[in-house]
Image (cartoon, rainbow, N blue to C red):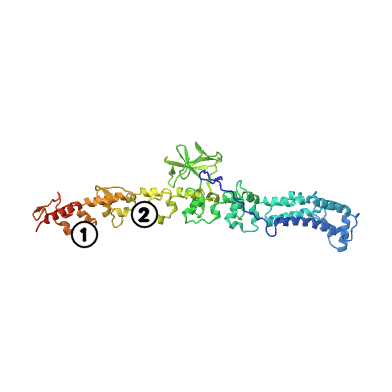
Amino acid sequence: MAKYYPDEEEIVESEPEKEAPEVIVEKHGGLLSKLVAVIIGIVIGIAGTIGGVVGAGFFVMSKPVDDTVRLVDGYISADVYSLVFGEEGADGTRADGYISDKYAHEKIGTLLGDMGKALFNIAQDHGTLSDLTEISPKVDSAVREFLRIAYKNYGVDINKDEFMNTSLSKMPDFLSKTIYGSPVGDILVHFTDLKNSPMMMALCYGEKGIDYVLDKNNEVVMLGDSKKRTLNDLKDHSDELFNAIALCDLMTIDRSSNIMMYLAYGKKDVHYTINSDDEVVMLQKRIGILNNVAYNAYGEPMPGTLSGMTYTDADGTTKYLLTDIVTDEHDNPVEVRTTDGEGYATMYYVTDEENNPVIYGHTTFGDIAGGGEVIKNITDRLTIGEILDEETINDNRFLKHVTGETIATLPDAIERLSIQDVFADQVYKTDASGEFILDGAGNKILNGEWWYLLTEGGVEQQYNITQMDKLIDNMRANIETAPLQKLKDDGMITALSQESLNQELRSSVAGVSLPVPAGKSTLGEMTVLEMLDYVDQCLQAIKDVP
């Protein structure tokens, strides 16, 4: 299964080169020194055994080796012969002895001469352990056991042929190269509970499910072309490998935090989903097409080139094949609004050139290091509905109307909100069940004081929350022109009693005529301005009355 981490191609400034962390290999006294000590012990042990056989009073240079060994057998009544030459097999041959049975009929002097020559050559760096195997098969079996223990206890897999043919002076360098070329996870597993550390597993083997899996025996099985990381890899590419570790392997991701989930995995139902086992599953990559332009999952134009249904990234190294259209749960094509204002791009699933699905990757440490694009894009890509939980949004008059906006677009979106959008339950009259009351034409009816704020010339207008000056102007104008009875009914005035509002207007006072507004017969029918003018005329009429 192919895998590519980025959702889009970006140019990111390189960070200053960091000093590679020290990789500590030697544990329990030093693996390398132990290996060298064991090798020297093998040589000394075999030489001492042979010397002991021929040196306990039976040293006769011209005597055959087997005769000498049988003499020892006779004196101590033990099967020294089998010890020295090895147990006899079904085919009559002997193996795994301290002395090769080909020396059985050779003189002791010949054996010691060959032994001395082999040891001298080894000491002078002209020979290797393989030279001793012709004399002592025990060398081969001892080396095999030594290599088995090295792998079992330390996880170091040493090539036997190379080991046997390496001189002692070059042995430390050979073993050092072997150790540093060994999978670091195979070594560390002997010193720590590696599988309980997602970070260390990622450092040693890569990403679970992409680079490796654990089999039914909880053993690591590498996938595809992925390889176990060696100590050399850690030493030479520590920054690169650490930056490639998924954020979810470095820390526990709080599932209740939408921001943390976005940082670790991307957008839900676009980049990842949660399966029935409550596991995060990364989804197949998708690319949108509109007017022969490719767009990523956020609707941003991609910098590569689109030729038919093949997209090539900007540097020309990676090609994606656009296959099936992405559909929703109702089998409708999924579209994304483009950020360049061109419209809506139809989304397609993506495969590599071998038709393997391309899966979105987890966010890595390198993706967020130094405040990278992933963190920056929280403000540009993550919507309010994806950041906040449903309860928080529904409890806020403003936020529940801007759930599809990002932090970056939120200020402008709030400015565009109308007063009616935000305060609908207060602006319009509702019944006991909270449903809006409609007039004969099917329109919502403005509530009391809101009529004075939101109407011009008696007609309702739409205002956003930044147009407070318009509301003040409307309030002033509507209060001046509204009948006093309406002001009373709407709770705008309380000083005048209903009895006063019902009083008929007098056309004269003290013999002085008063200008009663046309069509108005009671005080309640007059506007504030008309009332003020009427009162002023009354005062003028009576000021000269004695």
Cα distance in 3D space between marks 1 and 2: 34 Å
Q: Camera-side residue: 476 or 501? A: 476
Instruction: Report x, y in % for residue 480.
Output: 22, 51
Q: Camera-side residue: 144 or 85? A: 144
Q: Residue furthest top?
A: 307
Mark 1 or 2, nearer chain start: 2
Q: Is residue 435 visible?
A: no
Instruction: Report x, y in % for residue 97.
Output: 80, 55
Question: Where, quadrant-wise, is the N terminus in this rendering?
Answer: top right
Q: Residue furthest left?
A: 511
Q: Is residue 120 left or right of residue 434?
A: right
Task: Kindly state the secondary structure of the residue where label 2 is placed.
Answer: loop
Q: Residue at x 12, y 52 (%)?
A: 514
Mark 1: which amino acid?
Ala
Local crowd size for mark 1, using a 10 Å CA cut-off: few (<14), some (14–19), many (≥20): few
Query: In the rendered image, which residue does mark 2 sit on?
Result: 397
Query: In the rendered image, which residue does mark 1 sit on?
Result: 495
Instruction: Report x, y in % for residue 120.
Output: 83, 52
Q: Camera-side residue: 536 or 378? A: 536
